[in-house]
Image (cartoon, helix red, strand yellow):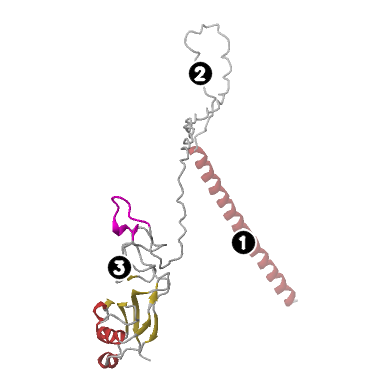
Amino acid sequence: MAAGVMTAQNGGHRGWVSAAVSAVLHVVLLGVLAATSIHIASENRSLIPLVIREPAPPPPPPGAGAGAGPPAPVEPPKFVDRPKPIEAPKPVEKAKIAARPKPKQDVALPTPVTASPPTNEVASAPAAAGGDADSGAAGGVLGGVAGGKVGGRVGGRPGGSGDDVWSIDQVAVPPKLVDGAPPQYPPMARARGQEGVVVVQAIIDRRGTVESDSLEIVQSRPPFDAAALAAFRQWRFEPGRDDSGQAVRVRVRKPMRFQLR
C-alpha cells in the first residue's frame, strides 16, 4: 500500500516538471519569433522601391512639321572595298645593241725559212755595190745567218761572239754535274744544330769547269756561305751545248742543303 502511494507521487511530480519545461520552451520560441519578425519589418521599411521607365523618344528632326510621319528607318552602313595600291611602273630596260663586228684584217704570215746544213765552202758571190763586208754577203759560209760576222763560228747566234754566256733555257743540252763532293758542314753550325739552304750561281765554261770569278751567292745563309762557295768551286761538269752540238758557256744555279742527320 505504501509502495503504491510512493509511485503515484513520483509520477505526478514528473508530469508537473514536464509541463513546466514545455511551457518555458514555448515562451522562448515565441520570443524568438517575435524578435525576428520585428527585425525583418524594420529592414523592409528602409528599402526604397526601384521603378524602371522606358526612355523618351528622340525629338523630330528640324524642319519636320507636326503632322510628319514616323522617322525613316536607318539603313545599316555599307562597307566599301579598300582600293588596291597602285604599283609603280617598272623601268623599261633599254635594248642592248650588239657591237658591229670589226672587219677582219688579213695578217701576213711569216714565210718559214729553211736553214740549209752548214758547210765549209766559201761563198763565191762578190759583194754588192755599196754593201757591207760584215753582212755575210762576201766571205761568209753557205748556210750562215744574215747579220753574222765573217769568220764566225757555225751555229752561233747573230751578233754574238764565242764568249757569249747562255742561260739554261737557251741551250739544247744543259751542263751536267759529273764530279761534285758535298760541302763541309761548318763545326760551329753543327754544334748549334743549325740547318739551311744556300743557292750558288756561276758560269760553266766550255771545258766544264767553274769560272771562279763568276761565283756568287743568290740565296744566303751566313753560317754556310763560305762552305758552299768552296765546294762549288771544285765541281766538274759536262759542258752545255747549243743546237749544233758546240760547247758553250752556261750560267747555272745550284742549291746546297746543309742538314744534320
Packing grade of label 1 (10 A; few <14, some 14-19, many >=20) is few
Verify CB contact (< 8 Å) between mark 1 and mark 2: no
**Residue 145 — which label?**
none
Q: Nearer the viewer, residue 92 or 18?
A: 92
Give me the residue at 72% from left, 73% from top: 7
Q: Which residue is mark 2?
A: 58
Please state, as top left, top right, bottom left or bottom right, where the N terminus lies in the image.
bottom right
Kindly identify the amino acid type of the residue bearing the numbered disc 1: Val
Quadrant position of residue 135: bottom left
Is 77 positioned to the left or the right of 223 in the image? right
Q: Nearer the viewer, residue 11 or 82?
A: 82
Kindly identify the amino acid type of the residue bearing the numbered disc 3: Ser
Task: Identify the mark nearer the N-term, 3 or 2.
Answer: 2
Task: Identify the mark nearer the N-term, 3 or 1.
Answer: 1
Mark 3 or 2, closer to the camera: 3
The percent coordinates of residue 106 (x first, y second) are: 47, 42
Mark 1 or 2, closer to the camera: 2
Does residue 246 belong to the magenta stretch?
no
Q: Which residue is mark 1?
A: 21
CA gap, disc 1 and disc 2: 72 Å
